[in-house]
Image: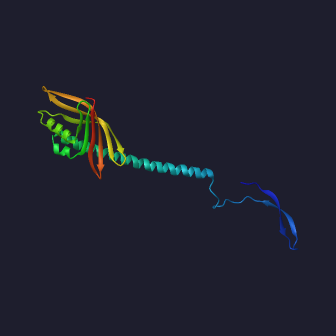
Amino acid sequence: MRAAIQTFFLHPASDGLARHTKAAVVPRAPNRSDPISENTVRKMIVLVLLATATLFSGAYASAEENLKDTILKMDARLFDAYNHQRLDDMKALFDEDLEFYHDTGGLSDYQQTLDAFARIFMQENPPVRTLIADSTEIYPIKDYGAIQIGAHRFCHVENGVNDCGVFKFVQVWHNDDGIWKLTRIISYGH
């Protein structure tokens, strides 16, 4: 608060002559229309930014969880079809521009990939695939879909013994108005 200050000012007297008068300036009561202090404004901005960040991080986390759930469901559909030798169901999840990169088998296009799976399904004991859930990472691709990275186990019976191997993969999923299809598959670590 301001201390009282003495000041002189002129005021008209009843005889029409101006007189010097001594008056004390009294501190005024706070006015509700006074501007907000700079410090208060800073605090308000920080609070608004924190609230906005919290809302957006929740929305982002929710969108991320939804994407992860969607891709894991698509992965489950794909490999349920694989494990039950349903080639037509697998075919429905492959984009016709599919490229399948295999570290020991090379590059295959859509038709070559379907032919390879058809040959696998004709085997007496085709491999069974299990996703290693804790290995899965999913990342959005802006205006396209998602990348799925992970590891999976393939097991098949060979000479009466269960033979299993764990391999790594990258799958690129394209979302075309809610219809998800694989466009790229990379299988490695064999």
Q: Residue at x 82, y 59 (%)?
A: 7
Q: Position of residue 36 (x, y in %)?
A: 62, 56
Query: The C terminus is located in which quarter?
Result: top left
185 versus 62 height, above or below: above
Q: Residue at x 26, y 46 (%)?
A: 181
For the image, the number of numbered tags is: 0
Q: Residue at x 59, y 52 (%)?
A: 41
Q: Is residue 127 left or right of residue 134?
A: left
Toward the viewer: 161 or 91?
A: 91
* Colour logic: rainbow
Q: Position of residue 153 (x, y in %)?
A: 24, 33
32 versus 62 height, above or below: below
Q: Quadrant of residue 132?
A: top left
Toward the viewer: 2 or 97?
A: 97
**Extreme-bottom residue of the structure:** 15
Q: Is residue 153 left or right of residue 7?
A: left
Toward the viewer: 100 or 6?
A: 100
Q: Quadrant of residue 154?
A: top left
Q: Position of residue 143 (x, y in %)?
A: 35, 49
Query: The N terminus is located in which quarter?
Result: bottom right
Q: Quadrant of residue 100?
A: top left
Q: Is residue 61 left or right of residue 6?
A: left
Q: Position of residue 22 (x, y in %)?
A: 84, 61
